[in-house]
Image (cartoon, grey):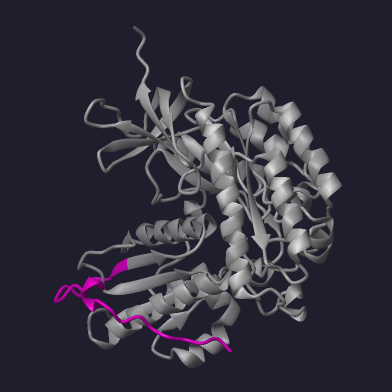
Amino acid sequence: MLVFFANFADLKEIILKTKGTGKTKVNLVTLGCSKNLVDSEVIMTQLKGNGIAVAHDADGNENNVVIINTCGFIDNAKQESIDTILKYVDAKQNGLIEKVYVTGCLSQRYRDELEHEIPNVDAWFGTMELPLLLKKFKADYKHELIGERVTTTAKHYAYLKISEGCDRPCSFCAIPIMRGKHISKPIEMVITEAKNLARNGVKELLLIAQDSTYYGLDLYKKRNLSELLDRLSDVEGIDWIRLHYAFPSGFPEDILDIMAKKPTICNYLDIPLQHASSTMLEIMRRGTSRDKTEILLDKIRTKVPGIAIRTTMLVGHPGETKKEFDELMEFVEKWKFERLGVFAYSHEDGTHAYQLKDTVTQKTKEARVSALMELQEQISLDLNEKKIGKTFKTIIDRKESGYFVGRTEFDSPEVDNEVLIDASKYYLKIGDFANIKITEAREFDLIGIPRTNK
């Protein structure tokens, strides 16, 4: 059973309904990952295509219907989704909004239980039930809008989902439960969407999937990511293409040749390794070993010199002792990943690992997360200090706290390093590229100045 509790603090921040107009205005609240964000953008596109006003994560006072796109991946994400649902249900009961609809991964995974526990939600929808959600607004699913998308990110970059679902058997992961089997999006459909995004000012595409390296196996009977990258690199207006979520087992090495050959494809690879101990990789059902992982990493860095590798590690999985964790620490110290994130294991019902005893205490999990991130902080600082004095092509994302904030080709939005340029001394245009000379380095940020042609 899930445990539900609400955070009712500061209800004044909840969206107030429009009074007296009788017109539906929707606030779509997105929780979770970038893949969820793309789903929300598709919902918004369909609603707008049906003449329905919709805003994303609005904090104003003009919306009378709320759609919550939930995350159900790990405990913290599930609790955030539950708290958000209860917040808006309470707002509805207080007459501040009229309808609350819930969609996304949590709804897909726990619908029956949620309907019982939170009966005041007006309707629940799974991850693949957009047409049913639209019917609540007397709207039709418009097939002519496929490939069109309202974006909620900065105008110059967008996430581009190339497939849905996952066929991998990883012990700890509930994604197949919520998203189903792997389904690749046809190349022509991806290209059409990329062209539409470019036409609307997008310069950087962030390719995402549950497992991007599995792309094409269902449609083309082969791993076809290299052809997709090759075709995307020819889309006019796209300057950067960034690849996320590449599974290490069965990694299609031909994408490295495309990456090395095509300047449009960033020298950046997000490859979640999850662990380094062969014992743990077997328990986690990752289909690889430490030796195979190191051979692959060596090939990646050899074929694409200067590539930035981003990875994630999972600590505290059942079976992980101090010995396996120490091996992970030694591995990270050896390979010095440019970018690294760490997660503590969450004991998820329905997964293979749920059958195992959750042997690592929460305190130990948190200590291991802290130890690994402390190691990565020093690695990141050392690598960043080597950039001082060098100049990098940088895209300017925003202005914040007196700085223009940008990224190099080695950094993805939200999760990676940023480049800070003093806005009191220099002017840069958001969404443009600039050549930035690095003058100072921090653990996860770089300080720089625009380089002139003088």
Q: Is residue 168 above or below residue 411?
A: below
> In which quadrant of the rendered view does residue 210 lie?
bottom right
x and y percentages locating residue 308 in the rendered image? 61, 35
x and y percentages locating residue 140 in the rendered image? 44, 66
Residue 150 is left or right of residue 186, and the answer is: left
Q: Residue at x 23, y 80 (%)?
A: 96
Residue 410 or 386: which is nearer the viewer?
386
x and y percentages locating residue 128 in the rendered image? 57, 68
Q: Residue furthest left?
A: 20
Question: In the rendered image, which quarter contains the N terminus?
Answer: bottom right
Q: Is residue 297 above or below residue 328?
A: above
What secondary structure predominates along the stretch shown in magenta?
A: loop
> In which quadrant of the rendered view does residue 65 lie?
bottom left
Q: Residue at x 59, y 60 (%)?
A: 369
Please give the range of residues in magenta. Answer: 1-26
Question: In the rendered image, which quarter contains the C terminus?
Answer: top left
Residue 235 in view of the camera: yes
Q: Is residue 157 above or below residue 426?
A: below
Query: Quick check: is 310 in the magenta stretch?
Result: no
x and y percentages locating residue 250 in the rendered image? 81, 47
Residue 313 is left or right of residue 428, and the answer is: right
Residue 395 or 326: which is nearer the viewer?
326
Residue 409 in view of the camera: no
